[in-house]
Amino acid sequence: MNVNRLGKRGHAVDSVSNRSGRLPAQLAGTARDKVKAIEEIAAIAQSCRDRGQAVVQAHGTFDLLHLGHVRHLEAARRLGEVLIVTLTADRFVNKGPGRPVFNETLRAEMLAALECVDWVTISESPDAVHSISAIRPDFYVKGQDYVNPDGDVTGKIVLEREAVEAQSGQIAFTDDLVFSSTELINRHFNIFEPSVRDHLDALRRGGGLSGMLELIERVRDFRVLLVGDAIIDEYQYTPPIGKPPKESLIATRFQNRELFAGGVFAAANHVAAFCKHVEIVTCLGGVHGYEDLIRKHLRPNIELHAVRREAAPTTLKQRFVDPSNMRKLFEVYFIDDEPLLPDIQAQVDAVIAERAPAADVVIVADFGHGLIAHSSIETLTKSSRFLAVSSQSNSANMGYNLITRYPRADYVCIDATEARLAVADRLANLGDVARRILDGRIDCPKMIVTNGQHGCITCECGAALHTIPAVARRVVDTVGAGDAFLSVTAPLVAAGGSLDRVGFIGNVVGALKVEIVGHRRPVEKAAVIKSLTGLLR
């Protein structure tokens, strides 16, 4: 068994054979005693170096420990006298919904039970850079899959190699028996319902993974224009403390708060991970406009075109949240959703008319808060080469902001409630509702209706309906999931993707989004690719 050590340019420079005369790094009583915090591990590593011992670090998820892992870690151990394994924390595991199967505590204990492993620590970071800087290993060891940095969609191996070399260490790659935890889990663990498993199997047989990955790459150079309402989402974290004896209400205690750039800004951040250039057309308030917050949270490849409405605020939706379970207690809107004054509306329409023709796809995120007038819709339908629309219903506009406001679109994405409102039917089969919208309510060839835990339905003129099951396993917060679905799927539809595959990608995007509190971070392209790979490998 050989371990290839790489020089600073990533080329194999020699081969290390087995070493004998192991020096135990510690005399722990149980496997759990070998699991330490990163600060303790850093001190242990320094102590080992002071004694002249070579420190080796291996890093990974190790969700399902198998023989390939054992061989990899045994090979890593032969590079030095002390082997430290750093483990990706649960919240940073990017292998698809339902992963990890085993939580970080169990994974750490399984690793620590191996004789070749001296110490284990859980890395509270999306990559190993922080732990590398703390441990300062002489050798940082990865599997053969990472020899070619181009194969790592996250780009983390490049950052990790730089961190190792900055500490005068070397990166090494083991070359031995290879298994995939993901393939083993998909084959032998029933983490999804039968209907979901059947759908995943059908996608695997039909080459779904390669087709989806190719489709995602197809939109890489797209220019996208988003038109939609500016919204700031505020979360006031207020745990309940009890019922006052003389009032019929629940008292809460303020803990802290977070402000997010939501609405069209959140949608733009999602799609900007997949497409080269994104522009936003919106209107900000002159009172409490939050422009600094908005610009701070936009990705670098997003260009903001904001018209000013001096006498009104930027819409703020203040939600009071129980932080123990992320349940929302109630919300307060700070909003002026009256129609824009004619001169301001004319400015919005002029920017749309100027920017839309150059975009590969125009996405309308219509929250019904006064930005998009009939004149805007007319401009959008005339100026857009490909028009994708979501016309949302919420507590401020229920029943008044229907998709039927739009006479034409190339792609419509709405939820089940919004679809039923469009045809004034709350009882009919959802597929029939979708057909009725396309057959007579709007001139549009393609539509996806999202349906929460039931996944989505794809509807295309002249084609069969497809029901795509949901793949979400852990729901933290549903705010913004529909916007993420719309913004990522719209370019894929514009690029000619089949709706059944686009719908599945959208469900994966939604599953990733509902694991994120508010808009703390957008859905990343690398996370979607790794999730698709994890589900369909």
Image (cartoon, rainbow, N blue to C red):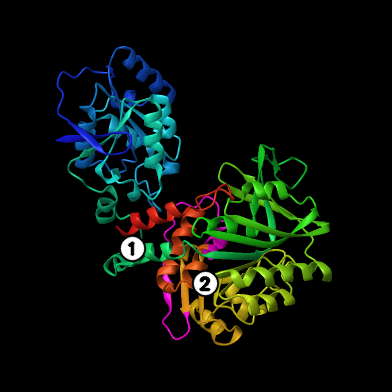
Q: In the rendered image of this protein, does residue 534 appear above or below residue 445?
A: above
Q: How many marks?
A: 2
Q: Which residues are magenta?
A: 460-487
The verdict on residue 21 being magenta is: no
**Where residue 449 is drawn, which disc sits there?**
2
Q: Secondary structure at mark 1?
A: helix
Label 2 and label 1: CA atoms lie apart by 23 Å
Residue sitting at x 63%, y 71%? 356
Image position, residue 338 (x, y; %): 80, 66
- Magenta part, dominant SS: loop
Q: Is residue 107 rendered to the left or right of residue 129?
A: left
At 58% across and 60% down in the image, what residue appears?
278
Q: Which residue does the image show at 83% across and 71% down from the upper left? A: 342
Drawn side of residue 379 relative to residue 504, left or right: right
Whether residue 415 is situated above or below residue 87 in the rendered picture: below
Classify mark 2: helix, strand or loop.
strand
Could you tell me the amino acid type at mark 1? Leu
Any mark on residue 209, and which? 1
